[in-house]
Amino acid sequence: MKAIVVGGSGFIGSNVVQKLLQENYEVKVIDDLSSGHFINIEKHVKNGDVEFIKGDVRDVDFVNKSFKGGADVVFHLAACVGRQKSIDNPQLDSSTNLIGTINVLEAMRKNNIPRVVYSSSAAIFGELITPTIDENHPQNADSPYGVSKLAAEKMILAYAGIYPELTGVCLRYFNIYGVNQRFDLYGNVIPIFAKRIYAGEPITIYGDGTQTRDFVNVKDVALANYLGATNATKTDVYNLGCGSSITINELAQKMIKIAGKQTEIVYAPERPADVKHCKANISKVKQTLGFSPMVGLEEGLEEYMRWYKDNCI
Ligand SMILES: NC(=O)c1ccc[n+]([C@@H]2O[C@H](COP(=O)([O-])OP(=O)(O)OC[C@H]3O[C@@H](n4cnc5c(N)ncnc54)[C@H](O)[C@@H]3O)[C@@H](O)[C@H]2O)c1
């Protein structure tokens, strides 16, 4: 099988590449390295297992050219990622996330590629109004990022309606963590905690820390991508998390214990946009694609902390 992974040098994309190589796929990665890191896929490129083409998904001609030769499936992960980044630069967000997706769909059509597995996001829902989120939760995206991810998802569904030969599998990720997730300006909670814990700095928890989140390991996300390519029989959307949740207090304690470092926890006022509880209902992805999370949180956090210590300090 032949795959094109758009955004394949990023955190999740590089883990998808790893999974595809394990499954004996021929892999081409397209990425502009704007937030991804070549080091994430370097060994596969150097040993000839992965073809890497650097370029921008917003560039129609580039995308068309790089899709030449076709593939069985495209994994589309390239995006400008995150709520705050999209508020800071909404044009960059929409041109990458929406126009970039149209460019991918058009290049797929021109090169007869029949399937896309798209990395969508729980951000499409906006304010969460039920503690457990299924696919039918209202979609009231409340940031340029949520809107662009929702629009891209809808665009894929529209294309699949217009062109029956095209199948779109949209996976709406909740909180993902794991190997290759680096700390950045717009960072997620786990890399932020890891950075502070290893630096001997206090970690900040907003609110009383009893808020809960669903953390799914990136290896399970890569598995779901693979299953989207192999098991989906029609175009559809799926919520993807691990289906259980823990409090931020518990998360902090687990990470501190794994690192074996004395760490002060500082409590700061709750942030207005933060929801109290968030957990994905993953019944649909389990029943339809045969997905089941394989990596327990303890095991996943231990691996992540080891990786962080070896690669990010
Ligand atoms: N990390 C999460 O918790 C999370 C949650 C929900 C959804 N997602 C989605 O998963 C996907 C991957 O996210 P990630 O966390 O791995 O982020 P990431 O920033 O590590 O990966 C995105 C990749 O896309 C590339 N890219 C960005 N703009 C590009 C452009 N114009 N042309 C070509 N390549 C470009 C980046 O260089 C990077 O390698 C994104 O679509 C994101 O919206 C992530």
Image (tube, rainbow, N blue to C red):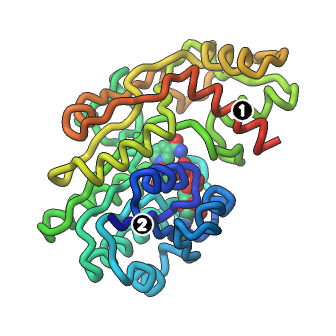
Q: Residue at x 52, y 61 (%)?
A: 8
Side of 41 where 259 appears, left or right: right
Q: Quadrant of residue 76?
A: bottom left
Residue 287 rendering spot, x and y as whole percentages = 20, 32
Side of 212 where 281 appears, left or right: left
Disc 2 element: strand
Q: Quadrant of residue 196?
A: top right
Q: Quick check: can you spot residue 124?
A: yes
Residue identified by numbered label 1:
306
Residue identified by numbered label 2:
26
| Residue at the right extreme, as displayed | 200
Q: Quick check: can you spot residue 144?
A: no
Residue 122 rendering spot, x and y as whole percentages = 40, 40
Gap in angstroms between the C-alphas marked 2 and 1: 30 Å
Instruction: Work out whether residue 205 or residue 115 is closer to the camera in this orientation and state it.
Output: 115
User: Which quarter of the rendering shows the C terminus?
Assistant: top right
The answer to whether the residue labelled 2 contacts the one labelled 1, judged by CB atoms less than 8 Å apart, is no
Residue 236 rendering spot, x and y as whole percentages = 21, 49
Q: Residue at x 33, y 77 (%)?
A: 70
Rate crowding at label 2 as few (under 14), some (14 to 19) or many (20 or more) other CA atoms within 10 Å: some
